[in-house]
Image (cartoon, grey):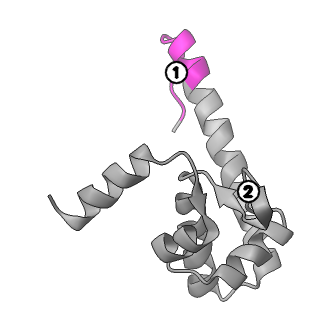
């Protein structure tokens, strides 16, 4: 079993991950992750004992944030805005796919 498949299996079994695990899996610092939470780009699922936990899905958003920051030299606030827009686009695309599946004869866009 490769490291990637082992990590994927571990993530599949997790319902929540700590901020430290998120930092390790994403390659971003805990401090930057806290800033993203402060700006509303990430939402912890729990604050038990003052310890933030996140869903494993956050890894994709955090890795995207890291690429945005390094590729475009964005500050944390700008990364937060960009992540919000990307998430909105993903939501709209999912809604569009759902509608298209209900009306398969309509011409597909994109």
Question: Can the viewer see residue 81?
Answer: no
For the view shown, which residue lies furthest in the front direction?
49
x 51%, y 26%: residue:
108
Q: List x then y, in percent, for residue 110.
A: 51, 39
Quadrant in the picture for residue 8:
bottom left
Above/below status of 90 relative to 85: above
Question: Can the viewer see residue 64?
Answer: yes
Q: Which residues lie in the magenta part? A: 98-109
Task: Pick the residue in front: 108 or 76.
Answer: 76
Mark 2 nearby-residue class (10 Å; few <14, some 14–19, many ≥20): some
Q: List x then y, in percent, for residue 47.
A: 78, 57
Q: Nearer the viewer, mark 2 or mark 1?
A: 2
What residue would you read off at disc 1? 107
Let me know if residue 103 is in the magenta part: yes
Task: Pick the residue in front: 21 or 4.
Answer: 21
Number of the label disc, if any, that sits on residue 44: 2
Residues at discs 2 and 1 in contact (Cβ within 8 Å): no
Q: Is residue 5 left or right of residue 80?
A: left
x 61%, y 19%: residue:
99
Q: Is residue 12 left or right of residue 17?
A: left
x 79%, y 66%: residue:
50
Helix or strand or loop: what does disc 1 sit on?
Answer: loop
Q: List x then y, in percent, for residue 21.
A: 53, 69
Determine the CA span between mark 2 and mark 1: 39 Å
x 14%, y 58%: residue:
1
Quadrant in the picture for residue 34:
bottom right
Q: How many marks?
A: 2
Above/below status of 12 relative to 67: above
- Circle nearer the N terminus (2, 1): 2
Task: Pick the residue in front: 95 or 55.
Answer: 55
Q: List x then y, in percent, for residue 105.
A: 49, 10
Let me know if residue 88 is in the magenta part: no
């Amino acid at each position: 079993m490769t490291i990637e498949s082992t990590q994927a299996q571990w993530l599949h079994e997790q319902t929540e991950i700590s901020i430290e695990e998120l930092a390790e899996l994403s390659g971003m610092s805990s401090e930057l992750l806290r800033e993203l939470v402060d700006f509303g780009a990430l939402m912890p699922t729990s604050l038990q004992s003052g310890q933030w936990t996140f869903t494993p899905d956050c890894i994709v958003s955090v890795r995207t944030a890291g690429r945005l920051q390094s590729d475009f030299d964005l500050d944390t606030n700008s990364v937060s805005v960009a992540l919000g827009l990307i998430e909105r686009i993903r939501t709209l695309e999912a809604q569009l796919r759902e509608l298209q599946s209900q009306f398969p004869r309509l011409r597909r866009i994109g």
